[in-house]
Image: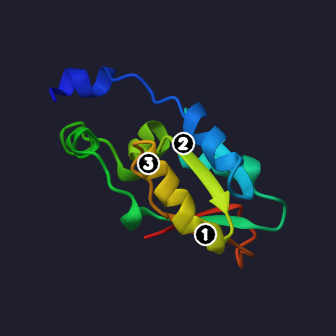
């Protein structure tokens, strides 16, 4: 795919897979990751006193974002904040539902992966990167 086509590719619509998930699994929360990225969107669905911890190393970053970061040059944190590095949607569930949710996403042609967890923070923050 060309750089132009990669940057102009339309956003995904998650309604069909979300309908399949919500009827089959007890979802705790969901967040569409748009402008502001994970940092701004995940805390909106996290209850007070809890923190979403996201492991950057578990997120498969599409090559176009590595190119922009390198050639821009654009700082790493800014890349995550502006471009979301390919994350389009986040689903929160209990550990027992994770493998079934991943399988359902795959059946609907979405590459999904577990990228973190929700815990009681020591820092008092509602979002943390784990590098």
Q: Is residue 86 above or below residue 118?
A: above
Could you say whether the residue bearing mark 3 is in a helix, strand or loop? helix
Badge 1 vs badge 2, beta-carbon distance below 8 Å: no
Q: Quadrant of residue 118?
A: bottom right
Query: Residue drawn at (83%, 67%), measured in percent from left and top?
Result: 49
Q: What x and y, as percent, mark residue 110?
A: 42, 45
Q: Earlier in the sequence, mark 1 or mark 2?
A: 2
Q: Quadrant of the N terminus?
A: top left
Q: CA distance from mark 1 to mark 2?
A: 17 Å
Q: Which mark is residue 107?
A: 3
Q: Quadrant of residue 63?
A: top left
Q: CA distance from mark 2 to mark 3?
A: 26 Å
Which residue is denoted by mark 1 in the rendering?
A: 117
Q: Which mark is residue 89?
A: none
Q: Which mark is residue 37?
A: 2
Query: Residue drawn at (46%, 37%), measured in percent from left and top?
Result: 82
């Amino acid at each position: 795919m060309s750089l132009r086509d990669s940057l102009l590719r339309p956003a995904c619509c998650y309604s069909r897979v979300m309908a399949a998930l919500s009827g089959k699994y007890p979802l705790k929360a969901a967040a569409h990751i748009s402008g502001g990225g994970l940092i701004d969107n995940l805390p909106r669905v996290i209850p007070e006193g809890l923190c979403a911890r996201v492991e950057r190393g578990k997120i498969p970053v599409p090559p176009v974002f590595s190119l922009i970061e390198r050639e821009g040059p654009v700082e790493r944190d800014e890349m995550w904040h502006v471009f979301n590095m390919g994350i389009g949607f986040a689903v929160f569930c209990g550990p027992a539902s994770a493998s079934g949710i991943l399988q359902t996403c795959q059946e609907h042609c979405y590459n999904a992966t577990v990228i973190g967890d929700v815990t009681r923070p020591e820092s008092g923050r509602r979002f943390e990167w784990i590098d």
